[in-house]
Image (cartoon, grey):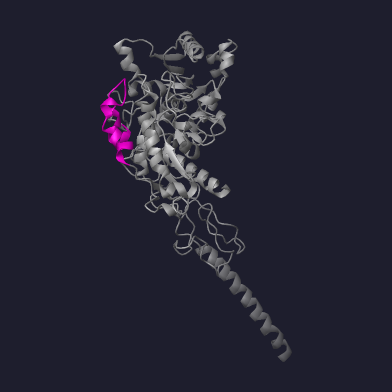
């Protein structure tokens, strides 16, 4: 009997232990609370990872280690399936708690980066810029002579509001929001750039810590006021020589012989390369002066054979003062009704290098039932008003799927940026009209946002613009327009009177590339 008792007692204890363990396991699974719609893994302790937002990792599977591995300083609620809201940055709204809906509710066409728990401003290390304190007569002093800056119009209207001109009065509702559109002159980016620089986060008063040195001379304004009237070459070149001599005598110039200096001109490059000192020769010698040969020069159209000259976008009429301005305009562009296959705004040319292609573009537009022409060739007051109305121009572009962009007085046109701002796919005929110019601001894969038809093919009559454009499918056009919509913020200049948070514009892109170039020059010198 004693032997039997010795056998039965351990057996009973073993059976009891197994029953207790099974009961404890079942009880745990029965009391686990899951969010509505979520399914649990089969009852097993081998599936232990909590359901967290994509990209957030947890500690190795274990019920002992419960703290998820998150960025330093970020805290979450204790691990529990009763907390179902995904952890997103403050201010981002998600769909109702559900693991099947993960996309944040944002305006149509607007995308955000993947959820991140850290929002850090870029450091100023290596990004400091020092702005020379040149005498006012070389910049703002010129603007006080606004009545005499142009042979064609009174520039006082355009130099107002830090260079973006007067607020537009749009009566037909084309331009939204109404507070972001200004009558901006196409050759005034040097003034806008100067005022945007005053808002730059990494501006320093200590030139020794600066990576780049900015010279706020209004080169384009100075050049433009002397282009007509056969003014003596000495008068045309006088101020630029004076200001560059001033800069050359500074300690900042002597430190690196000006290789870290940069300057902005609102004119095209061809106004700055006068070959002789004959009064009949066009323009100035700005780009031929010894100081500018050492500096980085930004203008709205560059000389691709000059390695230190770079093109930046022409200013458009759109100058957002907050992120909401851009979102509102992008939404309008995305949902605009576009009844025209293609359009053109411009005039014919006579005895000009652009005569052939421009005249053929206008002829083909008139012949095509799918083209809308804004003829700016007539001298009637009504035609002139239409072609100088920003609302009229933008209304045409936002109603068109494609906008043809033949060369103008020079290779480039301000119209290029107006059309892209409207989500109208640009059609180019020469690489030098965009691809070889705006390398800092336009994607290298030009087929993603534009159409290229070789000019020679059009001139020979080998192709018709309409036939080429009809080959694009609805889906291809949609994808190209989406690419343009994404590009809009960096093709325009924010309102320089405001500090627009969270939106990089054309100025920011240009400054970043100037700094990058300067660092490379310093490293190799």
The residue at 31%/20% (across/down) is 152
Q: Which quadrant of the figure has residue 395?
A: top left
Q: Residue furthest bottom?
A: 2
- The answer to whether residue 140 is seen in the rendering is yes
Q: How many numbered tags mark residues here?
A: 0
Q: Residue furthest right?
A: 3
Q: Which quadrant of the figure has residue 11?
A: bottom right
Q: Which is more toward the observer, 415 or 102?
A: 415
Check residue 494 for magenta coloring: no
Check residue 142 for magenta coloring: yes
Image: 417 above or below 110: above
Q: Position of residue 507 (x, y in %)?
A: 42, 39
Q: Is residue 346 left or right of residue 259?
A: left
Image: 347 above or below 324: above
Tell me which segment is drawn in magenta: 135-164
Image: 57 above or below 170: below
- The answer to whether residue 179 is seen in the rendering is no
Q: Which is more toward the observer, 252 or 71?
A: 252
**Quadrant the N terminus occupies:** bottom right
Q: Position of residue 153 (x, y in %)?
A: 29, 22
Q: Position of residue 496 (x, y in %)?
A: 33, 39
Q: Position of residue 91 (x, y in %)?
A: 38, 50
């Amino acid at each position: 009997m004693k032997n039997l008792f010795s056998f039965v007692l351990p057996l009973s204890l073993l059976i009891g232990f197994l029953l207790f363990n099974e009961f404890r396991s079942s009880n745990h699974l029965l009391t686990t609370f899951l969010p509505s719609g979520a399914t649990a893994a089969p009852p097993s302790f081998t599936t232990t990872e909590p359901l967290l937002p994509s990209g957030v990792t947890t500690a190795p599977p274990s019920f002992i280690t419960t703290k998820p591995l998150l960025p330093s300083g970020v805290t979450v609620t204790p691990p529990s399936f009763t907390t179902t809201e995904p952890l997103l940055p403050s201010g981002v709204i998600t769909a109702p708690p559900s693991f099947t809906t993960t996309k944040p509710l944002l305006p149509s066409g607007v995308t955000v980066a993947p959820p991140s728990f850290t929002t850090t401003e870029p450091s100023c290390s290596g990004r400091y810029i020092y702005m020379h304190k040149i005498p006012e007569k070389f910049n703002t002093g010129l603007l006080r002579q606004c009545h005499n800056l142009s042979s064609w119009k009174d520039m006082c209207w355009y130099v107002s509001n830090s260079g973006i001109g007067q607020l537009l009065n749009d009566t037909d509702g084309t331009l939204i929001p109404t507070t972001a559109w200004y009558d901006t002159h196409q050759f005034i980016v040097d003034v806008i750039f100067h005022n945007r620089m005053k808002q730059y986060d990494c501006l320093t008063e200590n030139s020794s810590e600066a990576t780049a040195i900015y010279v706020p001379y209004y080169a384009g304004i100075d050049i433009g006021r002397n282009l007509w009237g056969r003014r003596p070459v000495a008068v045309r070149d006088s101020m630029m020589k004076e200001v560059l001599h001033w800069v050359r005598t500074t300690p900042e110039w002597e430190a690196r012989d000006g290789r870290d200096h940069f300057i902005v001109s609102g004119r095209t490059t061809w106004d700055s390369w006068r070959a002789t000192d004959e009064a009949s020769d066009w323009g100035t010698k700005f780009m031929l002066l010894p100081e500018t040969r050492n500096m980085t020069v930004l203008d709205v159209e560059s000389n691709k054979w000059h390695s230190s000259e770079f093109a930046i976008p022409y200013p458009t009429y759109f100058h957002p003062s907050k992120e909401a301005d851009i979102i509102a305009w992008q939404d309008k562009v995305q949902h605009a009704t576009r009844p025209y296959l293609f359009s053109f705004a411009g005039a014919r040319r006579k005895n000009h290098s652009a005569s052939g292609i421009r005249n053929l573009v206008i002829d083909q537009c008139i012949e095509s039932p799918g083209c809308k022409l804004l003829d700016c060739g007539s001298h009637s007051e009504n035609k002139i008003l239409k072609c100088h109305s920003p609302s009229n121009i933008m209304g045409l572009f936002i109603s068109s799927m494609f906008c043809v962009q033949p060369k103008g007085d020079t290779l480039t046109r301000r119209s290029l940026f107006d059309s892209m701002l409207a989500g109208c796919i640009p059609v180019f005929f020469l690489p030098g009209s965009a691809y070889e110019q705006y390398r800092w601001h336009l994607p290298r894969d030009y087929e993603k946002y534009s159409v290229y038809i070789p000019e020679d093919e059009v001139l020979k009559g080998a192709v018709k613009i309409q036939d080429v454009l009809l080959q694009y499918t609805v889906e291809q056009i949609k994808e190209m327009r989406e690419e343009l919509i994404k590009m809009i913020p960096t093709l325009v200049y924010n309102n320089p009177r405001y500090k627009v948070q969270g939106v990089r514009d054309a100025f920011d892109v240009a400054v970043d590339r100037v700094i990058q170039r300067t660092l490379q020059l310093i490293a190799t010198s």
